[in-house]
Amino acid sequence: MEPVSTSWAQFFAPGTPVVALPDWEKPRLLLPASAERLWEKTAFYPAFRRTARLYRAYLRTRASLGLLRTRIADSPSSLLPPFLAEVVPAVKTVVMLAGAQKAILQLWDAQGRVAGYLKFARSRIARRRLAAEHRLLHSVPGGQAPRALKWGPLGDGDGLLVEPVSGHTLPAYLPVPPDADRLQGALAVSEPVPIGAHPFVADLTGQAFFELGFLLERLGGRRWPVVARHGDYAPWNILATSQGRLSAIDWEYGSPAGFPGLDIAYYILRVGSLIYRWTPARAAAYAASHLEKRAGLRPYEAAVLVRLAAWLAYRDSVEDADARDAPLRGWLVAVWEKEI
């Protein structure tokens, strides 16, 4: 199946001149060359490390000065008007963040406001993840995630339309902001249960993790609440809203049967590896120490949750088969193979 980035034209009106950042060889962000407030719209290009932000500023400047090469959208028609007609009919500009398996479309109205976000998935794995996100958005406690506005077939894939959340992403550094810890606590969906009755354990039954039984035994000394697990809980997926709350976006790796502490451990591992370039041992030790201090866990419980978080992230990366994640996989393996 061809990647989403090669089928970009079907999301723009026929005949629209479109620019791509950083270029057409590896298009990541696509938008009409004639879009108003181009500088503002190109802010959707992702960048979190300092060097990446400088590179993004360079690309946005080139786009604003009209220095990027254009291509014409040559699809016979756009997929969007029929899908959006009943929910967000007055879309003026589409900004597309393209990936190998999915695309995220930022939809702007005529008043210069973001009217919604449309996720599009084509591959089997991506469509399954998008369906899981749709289900989760209906079960996450109010205000902790955007509302799903529409879900259904779109072209040769599936589309999920979600409401925009006004706010800014958290800065990508450590320590974890206290509000991010509190958001995780607000995602509890049931009272604490013994480890043997926890749905997270049931979901892992039969999965090939050679130490899984041993690790779960280490968590048997207390009852644990069931929480909505985000699965990709990181600063770039958490918005501080204009009302002073935090709201998590991009729930496609999530599960309604999650375990407390896993998302926070993942948050630290991601920032430690991608932003600080820490060794696996240093990041794992920091994450375990955080869980001991902030969540009141015993040292061996915290160590188990860090290892499980690394293993879940590794499993998802392998399932996605994204070549860009290959270096991270070895790093994650070094975390979950660490002795307790």
Image (cartoon, rainbow, N blue to C red):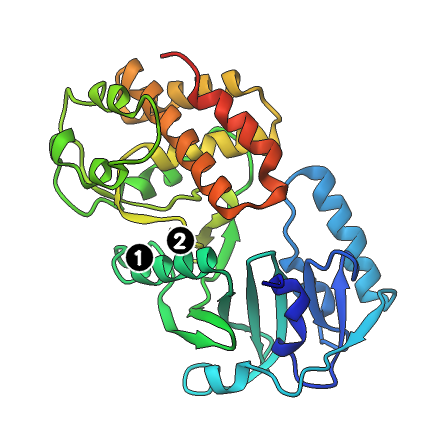
For the point 72% across and 60% down, which residue is it?
Answer: 27
Do we see residue 234 in this rendering? no
SS for tag 1? helix
SS for tag 2? loop
Which residue type does callout 2 highlight? Trp
Q: 129 left or right of 18?
A: left
Q: Which one is earlier in the sequence, the residue at label 1 or at label 2?
A: 1
Task: Report the Cα–Cα distance between label 1 and label 2.
Answer: 7 Å
User: Where is residue 287 drawn, in percent x and y?
Assistant: 42, 23
Residue bearing the label numbered 2: 251
Which residue type does callout 1 highlight? Leu
Tag 1 and tag 2, C-beta contact below 8 Å: yes
Do we see residue 16 in this rendering? yes
- Nearest to the observer: residue 326 or residue 164: 326
Residue 37 to residue 74: above or below: above
Q: 203 left or right of 239?
A: left
For the point 60% across and 36% down, which residue is it?
Answer: 326
User: Where is residue 247 drawn, in percent x and y?
Assistant: 39, 53
Residue bearing the label numbered 1: 136
